[in-house]
Image (cartoon, rainbow, N blue to C red):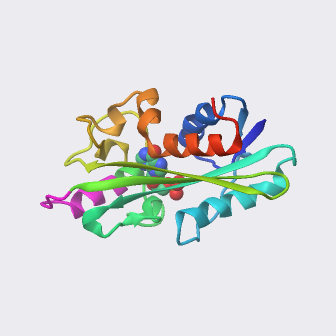
């Protein structure tokens, strides 16, 4: 099974490749692949990305796309589907993390969850989906150099380290994306 990931985000590709790769060869989308994430739900955005790439990939190969949001309890679920642009268009990871810590300044309830939706579309246009959730808390300051995005400010439930302080293997074992990938791989019959 050959899989092409509908993402230009190399961090995601490097995480997803090994997770889906048990019985599969995994490539990333061609350079410059980008899709406007105009959906209002994670699954809409994941499907937008998958369908944009589908015509570019031979029918015997599988297209896989993901969309992820960080849902913060005290913010009524924000930034959620808008997590990438939380601090505005072109926001960097550091901008988003700064705004998040600012919005939660003085707030005791730090509960949050990463939510990941993964979809696969085969050459016949059949869609398979998997969802994964990683609950945790927002830290009071960034910690760690690993991972990407909100990882330095996210402390997975039951841990005393941020997601950015975990090894890639530790992150994949408990992350939203790891959980979604295992559900998807099982549904596709390619799980280890
Ligand atoms: P998207 O799925 O690319 O739309 O991601 C939305 C936002 O969530 C981006 O700002 C990402 O950096 C962030 N994000 C996605 N996955 C992760 C993750 O595994 N850890 C931390 N942040 C993430």
Magenta region, residue range: 95-109
Residue 109: give x, y in percent of width and height.
18, 59
| Residue drawn where x is 58% and y is 38% of the image | 16
Residue 50: give x, y in percent of width and height.
70, 56
Task: Specify whether residue 184 is in view.
Answer: yes
Residue 53: give x, y in percent of width and height.
75, 55
The image shows residue 17, relative to residue 7, as above or below, that is above
Q: Residue 98 magenta-drawn?
A: yes
| Residue drawn where x is 73% and y is 43% of the image | 4
Q: Nearer the viewer, residue 169 or 12?
A: 169
Residue 37: give x, y in percent of width and height.
59, 65
The quadrant where residue 28 appears: top right
Q: Nearer the viewer, residue 136 or 5?
A: 136
- Image position of 25 (left or right of 105): right
| Residue drawn where x is 83% and y is 48% of the image | 57
- Image position of 166 (left or right of 82): left
The image shows residue 38, relative to residue 153, as above or below, that is below
Q: How many marks?
A: 0
- Image position of 170 (left or right of 40): left
The image shows residue 181, relative to residue 99, as above or below, that is above
The quarter in which the N terminus is drawn is top right
Q: Residue 76 magenta-drawn?
A: no
- Image position of 92 (left or right of 2): left
């Amino acid at each position: 099974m050959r899989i092409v990931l509908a993402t230009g985000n190399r961090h995601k590709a490097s995480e997803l490749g090994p997770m889906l790769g048990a019985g599969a060869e995994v490539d990333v989308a061609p350079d410059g692949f980008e899709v406007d994430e105009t959906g209002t739900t994670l699954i809409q955005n994941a499907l937008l990305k998958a369908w944009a790439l589908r015509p570019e990939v031979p029918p015997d190969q599988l297209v896989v796309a993901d969309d992820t949001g960080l849902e913060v309890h005290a913010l009524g679920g924000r930034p959620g589907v808008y997590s990438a642009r939380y601090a505005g268009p072109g926001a960097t990871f550091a901008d988003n993390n700064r705004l998040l810590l600012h919005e939660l300044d003085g707030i005791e309830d730090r509960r949050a969850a990463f939510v990941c939706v993964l979809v696969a579309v085969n050459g016949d246009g059949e869609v398979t989906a998997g969802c994964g959730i990683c609950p945790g808390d927002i830290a009071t300051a960034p910690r760690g150099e690993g991972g990407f995005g909100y990882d330095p400010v996210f402390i997975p439930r039951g841990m005393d380290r941020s997601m950015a302080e975990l090894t890639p293997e530790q992150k994949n074992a408990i992350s939203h994306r790891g959980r979604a990938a295992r559900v998807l791989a099982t549904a596709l019959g390619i799980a280890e």
